[in-house]
Amino acid sequence: EAIAACQDAAAIFRETGDRHGEGTALNNLGLALWEVRRFEEAVTAHQDAAAIFWETGDRHLEGAALNNLGLDLREVLRFEEAITADQDAAAILRETGDRDGEGVALNNLGTALRGAGRFEEAITAHQDAAAIFRETGDRHGEGRALGNLGNALQGVGRFEEAITACQDAAAIFRETGDRHDEGLAANDLGIAL
């Protein structure tokens, strides 16, 4: 239902000439497609949304659509394209002053870099994301970035640092009451040990 509603909205906005509305509907369509694992279609929707937001000059939503695009591309193992989308998203969100969005894009960038086997760059991206989340007070985002950092550190055999990152992530999730992510961090810690 969500997919059909977003498709209808995009068609209506296209018909009425509301490019911004069309971009928003396409971005939402991409999210709905991602939820049901129709990743290639999500790629198209998010590419189209990003292009419309670029055309209309909405840099912030362009960055958000590119961030979503990076997630889609990672799911279909198109890591180099995901890296480009995530780098562009981080730069745009930095430019627009959205520090939390920049942190999310950097964390996603780190995950795409890990997928491409570029672990040292991934470590830097996750460290930068964790620092931004710490600065903005987003404890959950910080925990996620630290968990991802632990995974990247394991990829280059820096196990002591990985253990510390995973322990820090688990502590944050325990503090925030997020039992699911605490379990993920504990599992990552078990692998690092």
Image (spheres, grey):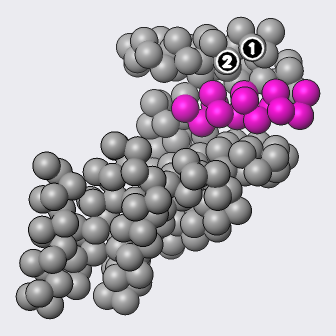
Name which residue type carries label 1: Ile
Q: How far apart are marks 1 and 2 (CA)?
A: 5 Å
Badge 1 crowding class, 10 Å Cα cut-off, few under 14, some 14 to 19, many 20 or more, is some
Magenta span contains residue 159? no
Left or right placement of residue 175 versus residue 14 in this view:
right
Which residue appears at 72% of the width and 45% of the height? 115
Which residue is rendered at x = 38% and y = 76% of the image?
48
Residue 31: image x %, image y %?
33, 53
What x and y, as percent, mark residue 126?
Answer: 67, 43
Could you tell me if residue 101 is visible in this image?
no
Residue 13 seen from this side = yes
Q: In this view, does 189 lie to the left or right of 25?
A: right
Which range is magenta? 144-157
Q: Which mark, residue 191?
A: 1
Residue 149, placed above or below residue 177: below
User: As rendered, which of 30 and 153 lies closer to the eye?
Assistant: 30
Q: Could you tell me which secondary element the residue under label 1 belongs to? A: helix
Residue sitting at 21 percent across and 77 percent down? 22
* 17 to the left or right of 98: left
Disc 2 is placed on an element classified as helix
Q: Pointer 2: what residue?
A: 188
Q: Position of residue 35 (x, y in %)?
A: 34, 43
Q: Could you tell me if the residues under marks 1 and 2 are in contact, i.e. CB atoms within 8 Å? A: yes
Q: Where is residue 103 in the image (x, y as percent from the top left)?
A: 53, 50
| Amino acid type, callout 2 | Asp
Q: Report which quarter residue 85 is drawn in.
A: bottom right
